[in-house]
Amino acid sequence: MTYDIHISDVRMFKSCRRRWAWQSPILGNWEPELSPLPFVMGRGIHLAMEQFYRSGVPFLDTLDDFFEKEADVNGTLWASEIESLGEAQAMSEGMLRHYDLWRQQRSVSNAYADNSLEFIELEKSFRVPLTPDADLTGRFDGIVHHKPTDTYWIWEIKTAAQIAPLRRSLANDEQATAYVWAANHFFPFHVNGLIYNILRKKVPPAAKVLKTGVLSQAARADTTFEWFSQEIAANHPDWREDTIQEFYGNYLQELKQEGNAYFARFSCLRTPEELDVFSGHLMATVEDMIAVSGAQEALLYPSPSTMNCGYCAFWDPCLAVNHKNDPGVFFNARFTQRTDHLERLDPQGDSEIGA
Ligand code: SF4
């Protein structure tokens, strides 16, 4: 038997063996019946990006379709759940509308602007043999060729409440290293690292309209050059460029210089030395996972830190086990067992990229 070890499984095993045993495709393979909304938003945004960069489908067309299907899949929802899904859709639409402005206007000065990238693969699943018993599996958001430097990179989309703390952590992100290691064993060309495309999970608030009819230019307003430019156009549709410059020129210049807290696109290199150190840990961890997969429940102990419990869907069954109660009641009521893990890894097959 060959075990399919997913990259996210490796991290989960290290952070909490109990959760891993419930969620991993090689053991329990349970997932919540209703996905947490941040995951739903993430899936919708990934799909919209994929369709746009694959074949030019406008972001909002894909997103609207996605949320319509999501509501259908979830069947009969409570009123509060419908409301939350609507809020998630509105937030995702605002984020992608803003991203589209940034992508077209500001990102042209970015070293990794859209026009410098050739998308080789999108949502590409992979399988890399690890040991005689195990393959590493997963899916890349994309693989891009950076034309100015003739180099290859993983294209990685992330959404975050705040970009700066996430950005700092990525140089030491083991999951990212795992993807680069896998890419270098899967593709016939060298993959240098990752190009991150990060969107903040927030839409700027509308600028205040002052009694004079002009937009507030409050210092440190939570906006971007691209978003504020759009608001000027919407509030003053008849203004000519010289009038806009007279009223807002300095403020727009400041916004342009300050950069933005909403989007970031940058590269993160992984050296051959890093990949080598990582691969030693990966092999050892996978051996542990296989050994433990047939072992006593006592070896599937919970996380020593509740830091890992924040987003865990298994909180209630976990408490039940701590009290020697049967967690089955929670699994029957709120979870479902996946049967299509590998199909989900590659829903798009090998379709052409034409965008
Ligand atoms: S609640 Fe915490 S300890 Fe329990 S399974 Fe989830 S991550 Fe592990």
Image (cartoon, rainbow, N blue to C red):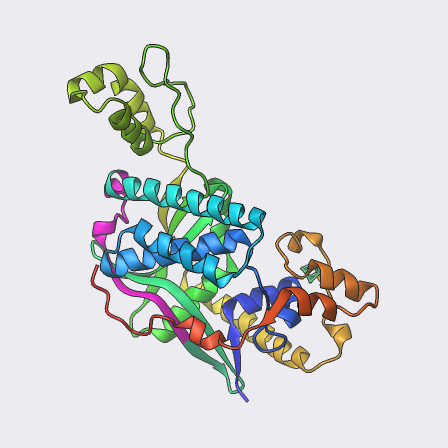
Residue at horizontal 54%, vertical 71%? 282
Q: From this view, report whether residue 109 is shown above or below residue 153.
A: above
Residue drawn at the location 35% of the way across and 45% of the way down? 96
Q: Is residue 249 left or right of residue 215?
A: left
Residue at image point 72% right, 64% down: 317
Residue with the most extreme top position = 212
Magenta run includes residue 116: yes
Asked whether, in this view, residue 332 is left or right of residue 125, the answer is right
Residue 187 image offset from top left, x and y in percent:
32, 73
Residue 144: image location, x then y, percent:
29, 61
The span shown in magenta is 106-126
Work out which quarter of the rendered image holds the N terminus and state it. bottom right
Residue 224: image quadrant is top left
Looking at the image, which is closer to me, 318 or 339?
339
| Residue 25 as seen in the image, left or right of residue 144 | right
Vertical arrangement, residue 117 with respect to residue 344, above or below: above
